[in-house]
Amino acid sequence: MESLMNSAEEQQHSSPPGNSWSKQEEINKNETPKCVGGFVLVHAGAGYHSESKAKEYKHVCKRACQRAVDRLKAGALAAEAVAAALVELELYSAPASNACTHILLDDDSPFTNAGMGSNLNLSGEIECDASIMDGKSLHYGAVGAISGIKNPVLVANRLLSEAQKGKLSAGRIPPCFLVGRGAHDWAVGHGIPPCPSEKMATKFSLSAYKRNKRKMALAEKMDTGHNHAKKRRQSSETENGSGCLDTVGAVVVDSEGNVAAAVSSGGLAMKHPGRVGQAAHYGCGCWAENAFNNPYSTAVSTSGCGEHLIRTMLARECSAALQSEDAHKALLETMQNKFISSPFLAGEDRVLGGVIVLRCCRCVESPPSQNIQGILVEFLWSHTTESMCVGYMSAQDSKAKTHISRLPPGTVPGQCLAIEGGVCRLSVAE
């Protein structure tokens, strides 16, 4: 897989999708080594990633990939591995600037915004969203606006696993999505330790909250009447250029060909208490579906402005599109037609978001072998924000590959997109 990122980095964003993808397929058919055990692709948010902090962003992705691969090598299925990747991403949490707010909020840390250290809401509290989906069982678990839990994805994963056990007493259907205090109490009742509120916030998130409160107070004092609306529009336009880093996620395929996806977010800085973003919504934050009667198994994880992603159900849209013959072309058209130009977002000047996707299918090894069955994995990322940080790794790799994808110079975030990716062949002994 050493050649994959080189070919992805050389790919021009504006080049015809058919030509650029066919070249990459040709490269990988000839050069991609065989891998065993599974594959993981992660993202540390779609938004803006400064060059000065590139090393830190990439380090986060490498650690998450390694954690997932360690679980895959130990025999874990895709859902367990993707949850492990998200736990690692949540460990590096701290607030970041948000593209969907009208005030330019402070970016105190180079890390992510999920779990402990996330953005504080208007009331000075941390409320997190997370979800996970298992492509094998098609079960889904999610939490929204949950407080006092260090790793929200663990609660979502526990909801998923409990649902797989079947009905509760008296024939009750187990929950798949819990919010607020109910989610917190359920988590504690199922053995997930709580984290005191004073420990959930870090010095970075607290200092950012205090500065943002002052900025909001000043903005509200200055903005009146017509000038208020005008300034909000201008501020929004400036903010959309700076991007958001509010969500982290991962997609995984295991050695059996099962797929899973997960996503976690601390949400927008200074959001209204109780606001639930796309990271918890079904079909919006993540999606995973084994092939069954379709040609491909697919997994998707999203990032960006939650309201934009919710109104377009982007995760599920991308998954459905990946059943087409040309994955690159399908994702490009989906991002353009179902997201940037979506009629559901007709009133938005700039539509901000990003996705990581993978699809896989069984393939015939060359030369054929009775003891080896191959899995062809195609993986892609696309974003309308200024940049997106990703990492990927197979179980055979000694370390993860990382990349910060950026829009071409001079383009407008929210009105154009970048798309890149690669191919990996997993060879699984039966």
Image: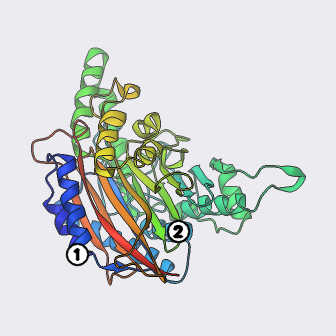
Residue 112 occupies quadrant: bottom left
Front position among marks 1 and 2: 1
The x, y position of residue 279, in whole percent, is 49, 49
The x, y position of residue 83, in whole percent, is 52, 67
Q: Which mark is residue 78?
A: 2
Q: Which mark is residue 207?
A: none
Locate the N terminus and report the quarter of the image it occupies.
bottom left
Residue 102 appearing in the image: no
- Sort mark 2 into few (<14), some (14-19) or many (20+) by Cα contacts within 10 Å: many
Q: Residue furthest right?
A: 170
Vertical placement of residue 387 versus 259, above or below: above
Q: Nearer the viewer, residue 96 or 224?
A: 96
Residue 25 appearing in the image: yes
Residue 374 occupies quadrant: bottom left
Residue type, label 1: Glu
Secondary structure beneath dot 1 equals: helix
Q: Is residue 15 left or right of residue 286?
A: left
Vertical placement of residue 150 versus 122, above or below: below
- Sequence-first tag of 1 and 2: 1
Instruction: Name the residue beneath numbered marker 1.
Output: 31
CA gap, disc 1 to disc 2?
26 Å
- Sort mark 1 into few (<14), some (14-19) or many (20+) by Cα contacts within 10 Å: few
Residue at (64% x, 49% y) in the render: 177
Secondary structure beneath dot 2 equals: helix
Q: Nearer the viewer, residue 184 or 130?
A: 130
Residue type, label 2: Ala
The x, y position of residue 93, in whole percent, is 41, 63
Residue at (29% x, 54% y) in the render: 107
- Rendered image coloring scheme: rainbow
The x, y position of residue 6, in whole percent, is 17, 68
Q: Nearer the viewer, residue 362 or 257?
A: 362
Q: Nearer the viewer, residue 221 or 349?
A: 349
